[in-house]
Image (cartoon, rainbow, N blue to C red):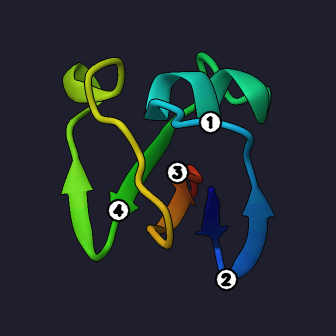
């Protein structure tokens, strides 16, 4: 299965949930937002949302400032 994360292609052996992807990328507990195919996915849906072949994932990191 091939997915694109922030424009870079990644291959996975099997289907993966957003939660598993977040864990794999060591982003658990970080202030992030995730879009899949230009649709924002609520954090409450990360465990249930399964990624599909050719999905385009954007991970946005929240940055504080003043």
Q: Of marks 4 and 3, which one's residue comes earlier in the chain? A: 4
Q: Residue at x 60, y 65 (%)?
A: 3
Residue sitting nearer the eye, 13 or 38: 13
The kind of secondary structure element at disc 1 is loop
Residue topped by disc 4: 36
7 relative position to 36: left or right: right
The kind of secondary structure element at disc 2 is loop
The kind of secondary structure element at disc 3 is loop
Are the residues tagged 2 and 3 within 8 Å (C-beta)?
Answer: no
- Mark 1 vs mark 4, CA separation in Å: 17 Å
Q: Of marks 2 and 1, which one's residue comes earlier in the chain? A: 2
5 relative position to 18: left or right: right
Residue topped by disc 1: 14
Q: Which mark is nearer the camera, 2 or 3? A: 2
Q: Residue at x 69, y 30 (%)?
A: 27
Query: Residue 22: image x %, image y %?
Result: 61, 31
Q: Of marks 2 and 3, which one's residue comes earlier in the chain? A: 2
Mark 3 nearby-residue class (10 Å; few <14, some 14–19, many ≥20)? few
Mark 4 nearby-residue class (10 Å; few <14, some 14–19, many ≥20)? some
Residue topped by disc 2: 7
Q: Is residue 60 above or below residue 45?
A: below
Query: Residue 59: image x %, image y %?
Result: 55, 58
- Mark 3 vs mark 1, CA separation in Å: 29 Å
Residue topped by disc 3: 62
């Amino acid at each position: 299965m091939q997915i694109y994360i922030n424009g870079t292609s990644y291959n996975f052996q099997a289907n993966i949930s957003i939660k598993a992807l977040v864990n794999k990328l060591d982003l658990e507990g970080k202030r992030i937002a995730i879009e899949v195919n230009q649709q924002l996915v609520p954090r409450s849906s990360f465990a249930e949302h399964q990624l599909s072949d050719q999905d385009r994932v954007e991970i946005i990191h929240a940055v504080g400032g003043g």
